[in-house]
Amino acid sequence: MNRVDIHQLMLFDLFEEQQRIRDNELLALLVYLEEGHRRRRRRKSCWNVSWLDYVQKVEHGMYFQLMQELERNDVPAFIRFIRFEPAMYREMEDRLHHYLVREDTNMRCAITPGERLAVTLRYLATGETYRSLAFQFRIAHNTISGIIPEVCEAIISEYGPECMPEVITAEDWRDVADGFTKLWNFPNCIGAIDGKHVPIVCPKKRGSHFYNYKNFHSIVLLGIVDAHYKFRTVSVGANGACSDMQIFEETPMKKSIDRGDFDWPPPDVMPRDDELLPHFFIGDDAFGLQLWMMKPYSRRMLSKEERIFNYRLSRARRVVENAFGILVKRFRVLLKTMEVGPEQASTITLACCILHNLMRMRYPTMQNPYADRFDRYGRLILGGWRDRPQLIGARNLPGGNFGSRPARELREYIKDYFNSREGAVSWQDKMI
């Protein structure tokens, strides 16, 4: 084969390759045009569903029909529906109005602040799914998924400074101590601390980070409660694998205590005593014994005096158990597995705590029948909150029971005081 033949053969191969490329490009163009034609022919989804229409909502929705009827004719049923008195609901609607109001558009009427608040309170009261609420209130479920965290953030912003202020003064702590002295016979105590699990779905790309010792995913709500079942401060959002003490170590309060700038009330004497003693919190065995943290004796073969101290401390610590019980009796969402991420779940939980405090401030005796109480002989009468499922306690890794020497001496002094004529209560010997 001469050079001319070789050259012609190469040209022929090049021509075939170019023809093959053009054929492929033409085929790709035809496929693209066909797909575009199919997309244009595809029927667009309708965003204006008939049963979500404003007229239908006004005529049949729960907010415009059932709630108005209950408010006019059956106030107890209204309270059971959203867990709030009508007057309290109207106050919240007025105070949150500027957070929740939206403008109407040419396409549709805006969802009113009252509707937004009502659907959120119903969700907090029941823990129903967004789709269930959508059928009740005739608001699209994806819209509700944005409304609920928005309203919870508004509640935190508006009522947080009033119901759970970030700054607590020494005088405030002194008032808490007075409450524990008068109601629970445990002087110098400024709060009971405990933690509970709030169940959530497994967060995306978090693995077992939020998986707790009870075999479900959760965030932890750690609270310090006063003598009147109010949350003085809370920490919410830690992963469910953490213990109470691990969470408390990371709180601003604990860091303030470590720095030495916590605003402690001045030392005070206990009733009918003359020794100035510091104020302290009370906790369970998860916390280490400190001058600022009293805990029960936990060794075996306790003496009678030590058992009396444990009884008096556990009696005072009932306030935190009862606070959690009252909280979940009003807000059942905390018992359901929230189908939101940890951040939104933390916002919802904090809003529930603030609303709990709000009701304790405005209607302090409304839910007292649900709390544990003691008769005149010191016998425990279990509260109604125990009839329902409750939040599960956070994992408690035993803390140091020996503590520092001053902490041990303080506990011994309080133990001796509780067993003395000045500090004893008449029924304590029968309770151990």
Image: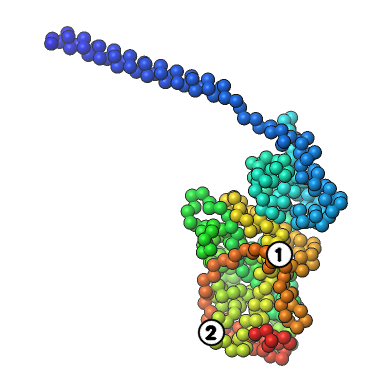
Residue visible at 61% across and 62% down in the picture: 221
Residue visible at 61% across and 27% down in the picture: 44
Q: What residue does disc 1 label?
A: 326
Q: Amino acid at mark 2?
A: Arg
Crowd around label 2: few <14 · some 14–19 · many ≥20 (10 Å): few
Residue visible at 57% across and 82% down in the picture: 297
**Which quadrant does the N terminus fall into?**
top left
Q: Residue furthest right?
A: 73
For residue 121, side relative to residue 293 (left or right)? right
Residue 29 place in picture, x, y as percent: 44, 19
On screen, residue 26 above or below 410: above
**Quadrant of the rendered image containing residue 231:** bottom right
For residue 174, side relative to residue 288 (left or right)? right
**Quadrant of the rendered image containing residue 423:** bottom right
First in sequence: mark 1 vs mark 2: 2
Q: Nearer the viewer, residue 292 or 31?
A: 31
Residue 5 place in picture, x, y as percent: 17, 9
Q: Is residue 239 visible?
A: no
Q: What residue does disc 2 label?
A: 300
> Element under label 2?
loop
Q: Nearer the viewer, residue 346 or 394?
A: 394
On screen, residue 259 above or below 125: below
* Tag of residue 302: none
For residue 5, side relative to residue 274 (left or right)? left
On screen, residue 256 above or below 94: below
**Which quadrant does the C terminus fall into?**
bottom right
